Image: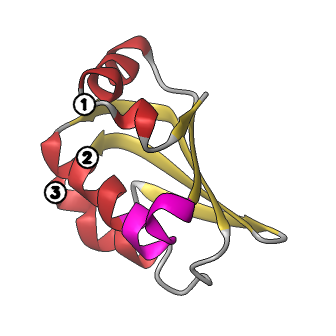
């Protein structure tokens, strides 16, 4: 399993390990679709070794689910390579990246 979750009050923490690509799309969606949309979401990238454009799409789908512009989503513990992908994609304008 590449994706694990933990709930802390109204905060849903989603940890991804290994490759964040299309092969985990169902697992990623299952990590949040049972959680109220107005929750805070934290995506932990500590163990992400690779991500592609489908991962960017999955993050955008989560953002839509969580309320679009009013979504409360943090992307944390990004390695420099992942941070560069997010920066080039202008995701810093859509998400809080720590």
Crowd rating for badge 2 (residues with CA inside 10 Å; few <14, some 14–19, many 20+): some
Dot 1: element: loop
Q: Residue extending furthest front?
A: 69
Q: Nearer the viewer, mark 3 or mark 2?
A: 2
Instruction: Say above or below: 86 vs 61.
Output: above
Q: Which mark is residue 22?
A: 3
Residue sitting at x 51%, y 71%: 66
> Label 1, on which residue?
89
Label 2 sits on residue: 56
Q: Mark 1 packing: few (<14 Cα in 10 Å), some, or many (20+)?
A: few
Q: Quadrant of residue 97?
A: top right
Counting from the top left corner in percent of width and height, residue 42 is at 61, 51
Against 71, residue 15 (above or below) is: above
Q: Is residue 52 left or right of residue 58?
A: left
Of the image marks 2 and 1, the number of the one nearer the N terminus: 2
Q: Residues within 10 Å of mark 3 (few under 14, many from 20)?
A: some
Question: How many numbered discs, if any?
Answer: 3
Q: Is residue 96 left or right of residue 58?
A: right
> Which of the labelled discs sits on residue 4, or is there none?
none
Q: Nearer the viewer, residue 70 or 29?
A: 70
Q: How is the image coloured?
A: secondary structure
Relative to 49, is 20 above or below?
below
**Magenta region: which residues?**
62-71
Mark 2 element type: helix
| Residue 31 visible in image | no
């Amino acid at each position: 399993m590449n994706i694990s979750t933990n709930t802390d009050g109204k905060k849903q923490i989603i940890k991804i390990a290994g490759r964040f690509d299309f092969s985990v799309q169902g697992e990623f969606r299952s990590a949040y679709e049972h959680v109220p949309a107005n929750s805070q979401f934290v995506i932990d990238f500590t163990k992400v070794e690779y991500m592609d454009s489908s991962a960017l799409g999955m993050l955008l789908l989560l953002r839509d689910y969580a309320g679009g512009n009013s979504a409360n989503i943090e992307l944390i513990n990004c390695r420099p390579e992942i941070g560069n992908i997010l920066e080039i994609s202008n995701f810093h304008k859509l998400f809080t990246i720590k």
